[in-house]
Structure formats: C-alpha cells, structure tokens
Amino acid sequence: MGAHTAISLEEYLHTRFPNPEPEFRDGEIQERTMPDYLHGKVHGLLFMFFALLRSRVRVFPSVETRLKIESSKVLIPDVTVFFPDEPREQPETPPLIAIEILSLEDRLSAVREKLEEYRTWGVPHVWLVDPHSRRLYSCEAGFAEVSSLRVPELDTELKPADVFDWQ
C-alpha cells in the first residue's frame, strides 16, 4: 500500500482520483495496489454473476464503490452487492456482500484488517477471493477457506468455477 496524503473528508469525497482510487482513513488518503489481469478478470466475473441474478431477485451489484463506514473512513471494496434496495449515490449503510480480490502486491494482514472492518460495520457476507491460488475465503465466522460462498438471503451459491474457470 503506498503513500499517505493529508486531506479532509469533504475534499476526498469531491475529488476524482486516477485508478485505482485511494481509500480515506482518518484524514489521509491511502493508495491501493494495482490490479493485474487475473484480478480484473475475476472482478468482472463476480459482478456479472450478481448482475445475472437480477432476473430473479432484487440485487444491486457494483464495483469500486466508496463506502463511508465511519465519519473518518471511506473504504472501497472490489465488488459490493446491495439488497433489497438500491443504495444512494454515496452508500452509508452496509451492503449485503463486500468482496475483496487479492492482488499479488497485497499484504494479507492489511486485507484481513479491512475485511474485519466490513464485518464490524455490519456487512453480513464478507469474502476474499484469491485469483492466483484459486481460493475462496469467508469472513463471516472468522477467516476461513471455503469450497463455495453461500448467500441464503438470495438463495444462491458462488462456486470456484463461477469465477475461476470461465473461458
């Protein structure tokens, strides 16, 4: 994770940054790691998986959306899924699902801390997807590798083939 720069929350929220957009923590912008091809591919497939669910359930998936989880903290999950209502332009309530996709440059300790912040904020389903090792992790009851990711509220299950084996 890169350099830190002091800035106000209002200034951060009204600034457009180059990709990848930085996050905001306690008056500082914090750079995020650059995604590689596998990250981008899985990113798109996760969004598409949930976008296709819209034909049968009222979900609102999004990518790279700023989430104001505290008055001094804005985090940007790779993929979020809102349910059953579409969020405001600047969501201030937890989505149903927050997904982080591991990049080669990510430090696992920093990513796990971010996942726990989503849980503390009230996100029911917090997931980590590692496209390089082709592994799925759930952070719903601790941090654990899982064979699939289930969402009972949507009566759906995300399997590794849904995001790793697409041709």
Image (spheres, rainbow, N blue to C red):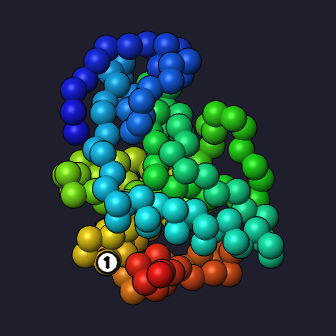
Residue at 22% over, 39% down: 1
Q: Quick one: which residue is furthest to the front in this view?
A: 167
Q: Which residue is mark 1?
A: 134
Q: Position of residue 88 (x, y in %)?
A: 72, 38
Specify whether 40 is left or right of 63: left
Q: Position of residue 38 (x, y in %)?
A: 35, 65
Specify whether 71 is left or right of 37: right
Of residues 38 and 82, which is closer to you in this image? 38
Q: Amino acid at mark 1?
A: Arg
Residue at 42% over, 58% down: 40
Q: Height in image: 135 above or below 25?
A: below
Specify whether residue 124 is in view: no
* Mark 1 residue crowding within 10 angstroms, few (<14) / some (14–19) / many (20+): few
Residue 144: quarter of image? bottom left
Q: Height in image: 26 above or below 158?
A: above
Residue at 48% over, 81% down: 166
Circle 1: element type:
loop
Residue 14: quarter of image? top right
Q: Position of residue 58 (x, y in %)?
A: 78, 64
Q: Position of residue 68 (x, y in %)?
A: 53, 34
Specify whether residue 107 is in view: yes
Of residues 128 and 134, which is closer to you in this image? 134
Q: Height in image: 122 above or below 13?
A: below
Q: Height in image: 42 above or below 7?
A: below
Specify whether 80 is left or right of 166: right
Please tell me how many numbered marks the rendered image carries.
1
